[in-house]
């Protein structure tokens, strides 16, 4: 047989367009207001920064491949079993590892219309088929997901709260989703924004993990903990899932300084609470002020908000994004030109956004 002329990537890879991250600069603007990636505008806990600096003394050493100290810190704070926790290079890596562990070529991953773009990319790279379920009223639609489940569905991944809508499904709906999925389909609950939610009917997924063998929760230190630059996240799953994923995890996927900072961050409950309060207060204020401008914000429980511009008004999300950029503010354009996603920032940043939107509507 004749050898191929050049190395060829596996079939799924050819179908992929690279992930596009939120913009971080504006040509000619020295210090733009970056509200494009749902990072924490309040930054990390000072204790996390101290732990990170302390870890600099140990850069010649490999990190603890068993991730013991961080798993213990997470377990203590969240009341979980440390043996069921795996840490990784952002929650993105944990989702990748779950896809690699459970998805064979031709298998299907059930995804919601919106959600974390990397799920589609990881699925295709595995040779899997991403199957998208439509959302209803800007929310993940459990019935639509269940209607699309087949014998080939191996994973179902939803972000709760969802991105870019910022909405959530209740604990009861999550339970219904899990109960309706085939038993061999793993439900992955991506809780990147879980810590921001202050609703009694919300469950980050921990209860579902405890109640069976086919649900996993992923979490991150990139959002409320303000450590996006360090790339550290974690997953909590039933023992058989954790055992399977541990077999393919590279031993040092979570680096030492990141784990040291994360352990300090998760223990700083005061910082987490301050960030959560700031976010909730501003979400409320922003919703009121946008309504005064005649703009509708989809009710968000996360650290960002999606504005839907009215049809036919001559103003839209794409136009607003360009206007904001001229004011030195970087939002995240949405898939639809009618929409615009903006991260909740510091007080002066939010004020700058609201002023710019008012001016955009007035011109
Ligand atoms: C819904 C959702 N899931 C996961 C992630 C990935 O986070 P991490 O930084 O932990 O990889 C993001 C990042 O923006 C996200 O929006």
Image: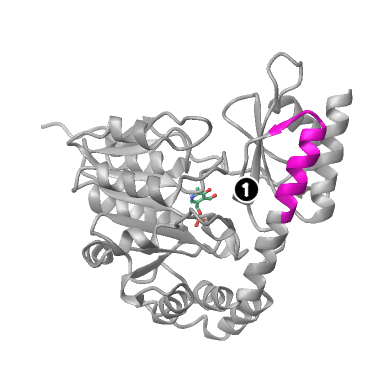
Residue ID at (30%, 64%): 210
CB at mark 1 closer than 8 A to ligand 1? yes
> Which span of residues is magenta-colored?
281-296
Q: Is residue 213 inside the magenta stretch?
A: no
The residue that disc 1 covers is: 37
State the residue in front, 271 or 61. Answer: 271
| Secondary structure that dominates the magenta span | helix
State the residue in front, 92 or 55. Answer: 92
Residue 255 percent location from the top left of the image: 47, 72
State the residue in front, 198 or 99. Answer: 198
Question: In which image quadrant can residue 242 be found?
Answer: bottom left
From the image, which quarter does the N terminus lie in? top left
Give the class, few, some or many, for how many residues have Cα within 10 Å of label 1's Cα (few <14, many ≥20). some
Residue 151 percent location from the top left of the image: 17, 36
Q: Is residue 291 inside the magenta stretch?
A: yes
Residue 253 percent location from the top left of the image: 40, 66
Is residue 163 something that shows in the picture?
yes
Viewed as shown, does residue 88 lie left or right of 269? left
Question: In which image quadrant can residue 132 be found?
Answer: top left
Residue 211 percent location from the top left of the image: 28, 61
Which residue reaches farthest top?
312
State the residue in front, 208 or 217. Answer: 208
Is residue 27 something that shows in the picture?
no
The residue tagged with tag 1: helix, strand or loop? loop
């Amino acid at each position: 047989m004749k050898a191929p002329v050049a190395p060829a990537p596996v079939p799924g890879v050819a179908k992929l367009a690279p992930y596009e991250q939120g913009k971080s600069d504006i040509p000619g603007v020295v210090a733009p207001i970056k509200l494009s990636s749902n990072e924490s505008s309040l930054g990390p806990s000072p204790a996390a920064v101290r732990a990170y600096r302390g870890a600099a003394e140990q850069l010649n050493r490999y990190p603890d491949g068993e991730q013991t100290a961080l798993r213990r810190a997470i377990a203590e704070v969240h009341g979980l079993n440390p043996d069921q926790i795996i840490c990784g290079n952002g929650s993105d890596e944990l989702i990748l590892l779950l896809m690699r562990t459970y998805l064979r070529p031709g298998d299907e991953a059930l995804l919601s219309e919106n959600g974390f773009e990397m799920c589609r990319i990881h699925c295709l790279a595995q040779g899997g088929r991403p199957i998208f379920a439509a959302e209803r009223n800007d929310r993940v639609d459990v019935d639509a997901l269940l209607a699309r489940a087949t014998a080939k569905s191996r994973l179902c991944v939803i972000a709760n709260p969802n991105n870019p809508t910022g909405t959530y499904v209740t604990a009861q709906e999550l339970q219904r989703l899990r109960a309706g999925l085939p038993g061999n389909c793993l439900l992955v609950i991506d809780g990147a924004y879980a810590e921001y939610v202050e609703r009694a009917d919300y469950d980050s997924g921990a209860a579902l993990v405890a109640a069976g063998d086919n649900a996993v929760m992923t979490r991150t230190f990139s959002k409320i903990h303000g450590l996006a630059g360090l790339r550290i996240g974690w997953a909590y799953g039933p023992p058989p899932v954790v055992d399977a994923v541990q077999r393919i995890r590279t031993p040092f996927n979570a680096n030492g300084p990141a784990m040291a900072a994360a352990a300090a961050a998760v223990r700083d409950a005061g910082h987490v609470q301050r960030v959560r309060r700031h976010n909730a207060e501003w979400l409320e204020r922003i919703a009121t002020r946008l309504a005064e401008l005649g703009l509708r914000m989809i009710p968000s429980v996360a650290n960002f908000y999606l504005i839907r511009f009215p049809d036919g008004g001559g103003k839209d999300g794409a136009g607003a994004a360009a206007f904001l950029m001229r004011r030195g503010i970087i939002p995240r354009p949405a898939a639809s030109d009618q929409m615009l996603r903006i991260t909740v920032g510091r007080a002066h940043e939010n004020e700058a956004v609201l002023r710019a939107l008012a001016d955009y509507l007035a011109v």
